[in-house]
Image: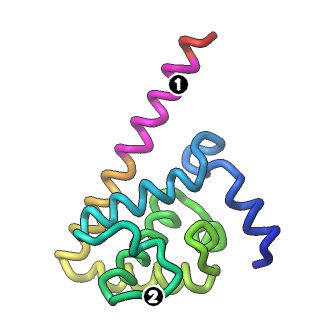
Amino acid sequence: MHTHELAVIKSQPLGYPRKTIDRRTVRRMIELTVAAALNLPVDELAAKTRRTAPVAFARQISMYCAHVTFGWSLTEAGAVFCRDRTTAAHACRVVEDRRDCPHIDAVVSTVEEQLHSWITAMEFCRQTVEGNLE
């Protein structure tokens, strides 16, 4: 992916629901939620290098949620986390494989539920504010 293509993806609005919340905001919420769930420093998830295995797995969960929970393409999910499509695809495969473990599945499910709750609440707030501005 070229730099100008990444800029286009980063500036486009979120795909779930379409055209509402900036992708960088969603990335940060995903990172905060995953870091809190796994008791990791959130800044580690945004690091350019792999870091420790738990941090790498947390980053993989983040890309998985971007793809599965928010419906972003693998290209979009990778780009918003400054990775490429193949890295996002690998992350999704790793998370799917590890969900066979009940503990991992419970963590990922809880993260997904929290992200759904967050996006639903943000949409409600936006609709309420827009309705009162008209």
- Residue of label 2: 50
The magenta-colored residue range is 117-130
* Magenta-drawn stretch contains 118: yes
Please give left or right for residue 9 compared with residue 51 in the image.
right
Residue 65: % across, % down: 44, 65
Say how many tags the image has: 2
Q: Residue at x 57, y 43 (%)?
A: 21
Which numbered mark, 1 or 2, is in the foreground of this view?
Answer: 2
Q: Residue at x 28, y 71 (%)?
A: 40
Q: Secondary structure at mark 1?
A: helix
Instruction: Give above or below for 103 relative to 122.
Output: below
- Residue of label 1: 127
SS assignment for the magenta stretch, majority: helix
Q: Residue at x 71, y 53 (%)?
A: 11
Q: Nearer the viewer, residue 41 or 85?
A: 41
Residue 107: % across, % down: 24, 68
Residue type at mark 1 is Gln
- Tag 1 near tag 2, CB within 8 Å: no
Q: Name the quadrant of the N terminus.
A: bottom right
Instruction: Give above or below for 113 relative to 41.
Output: above
Q: Image quadrant of residue 101?
A: bottom left
